[in-house]
């Protein structure tokens, strides 16, 4: 199995267009690597021509178009994207569907709760029914494997996390609003994608122990980001901070597989390679994803 990181930042990317925190200032000066919003492409191997996208952030179409590994066959107007999987209904996971689905047939995998949170009352989502493409929604049931293509399977696992802001007005009927994904190949190698984890749980423990490669929520270092810009109100819940005695880093240190952080907020000091927080990650053997990062299982 092969994974390619198309984006590794939280919503808004890095630097964020309206932010002048220490990290964003460093990125604008060329002292930190810019990053797109988190999106990961998965293929069964080096020769596979179909890709599964984990997440559909706003710029996903542009990012995919500029990445040679996802390019269509020469002379043919078609996409190498075989399907898109949505971990939750937040903007960073869903907004890009409006671009992808209007130009090409698209298969979208999600729980029923995530599908409803995106479609119900969303005027713009209606454009997907009238575009040149055709969107097929494939339901994912918790803890059940779904066969994709080229021997890959996907499994949705409920994890703690906040509901998407727009979904909070809808009745909560299940725990399907925020999930992690387990992607397995024909050999049983497992990649876990968990970009939004609100805190510890038994399901998170199982995912951490199961993963050969773990792409985990790296949104915040702490609730105050060590004196950087204060957390925006909409980011104040739904993400388990890395640092401190109760932080996720201590749990990640116990994982058997490779540990890589995604969905990193622009105020998180781990984006600065010379920060004390980045040194702490290295001490525990935890990596920070970067755009165009290649991972082979």
Image (cartoon, rainbow, N blue to C red):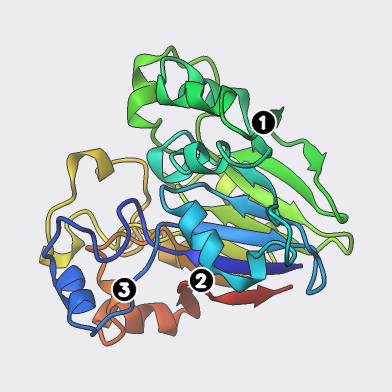
Secondary structure at badge 3 equals helix
173 vs 243: above or below:
above
In the picture, measured across the screen, residue 280 lies left or right of residue 104, that is: left
For the residues marked 1 and 3, what is the alpha-carbon distance in whole angstroms?
Answer: 40 Å
User: Residue at 19% of width from left, 75% of height from top?
Assistant: 28
Question: Which sits in the foreground, 118 or 80?
Answer: 80
Question: Which sits in the foreground, 293 or 169?
Answer: 293
Quadrant position of residue 162: top left
Secondary structure at badge 2 equals loop
Residue contact at pointers 2 and 1, CB within 8 angstroms: no
For the residues marked 2 and 1, what is the alpha-carbon distance in whole angstroms?
Answer: 43 Å
Secondary structure at badge 1 equals loop
Q: Which residue is mark 1?
A: 134
For the residues marked 2 and 3, what is the alpha-carbon distance in whole angstroms?
Answer: 16 Å
User: Residue at 59% of width from left, 63% of height from top?
Assistant: 214
Q: Percent position (x, y) of residue 206?
A: 65, 51
62 vs 196: above or below:
below
Q: Which residue is mark 2?
A: 253
């Amino acid at each position: 199995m092969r994974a390619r990181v198309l984006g590794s930042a939280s919503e808004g990317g890095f630097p964020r267009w309206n932010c002048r925190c220490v990290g964003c200032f460093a990125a604008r000066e060329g002292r930190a690597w810019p990053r797109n919003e988190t999106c990961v492409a998965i293929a069964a191997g080096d020769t596979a021509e179909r890709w599964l996208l984990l997440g559909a952030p706003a710029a996903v179409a542009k990012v995919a178009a500029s990445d040679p590994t996802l390019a269509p066959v020469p002379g043919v107007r078609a996409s190498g994207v075989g399907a898109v999987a949505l971990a939750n209904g937040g903007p960073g996971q869903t907004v890009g569907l409006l671009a992808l689905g209007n130009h090409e047939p698209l298969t979208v995998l999600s729980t029923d709760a995530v599908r409803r949170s995106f479609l119900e009352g969303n005027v713009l989502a209606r454009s997907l029914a009238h575009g040149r493409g055709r969107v097929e929604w494939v339901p994912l049931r918790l803890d059940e494997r779904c066969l994709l293509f080229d021997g890959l399977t996907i499994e949705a696992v409920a994890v703690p996390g906040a509901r998407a802001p727009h979904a909070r007005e809808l009745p909560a009927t299940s725990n399907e609003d925020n999930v992690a994904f387990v992607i397995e190949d024909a050999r049983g190698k497992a990649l876990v994608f968990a970009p939004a984890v609100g805190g510890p749980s038994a399901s998170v423990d199982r995912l951490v122990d199961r993963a050969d490669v773990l792409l985990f929520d790296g949104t915040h270092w702490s609730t105050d980001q060590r004196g950087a810009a204060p957390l925006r109100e909409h980011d104040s819940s739904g993400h388990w901070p890395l640092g401190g005695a109760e932080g996720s880093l201590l749990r990640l240190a116990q994982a058997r597989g490779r540990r890589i952080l995604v969905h990193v907020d622009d105020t998180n000091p781990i984006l600065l390679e010379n920060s004390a927080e980045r040194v702490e990650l290295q001490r525990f053997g935890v990596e920070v994803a970067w755009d165009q990062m290649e991972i082979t299982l």
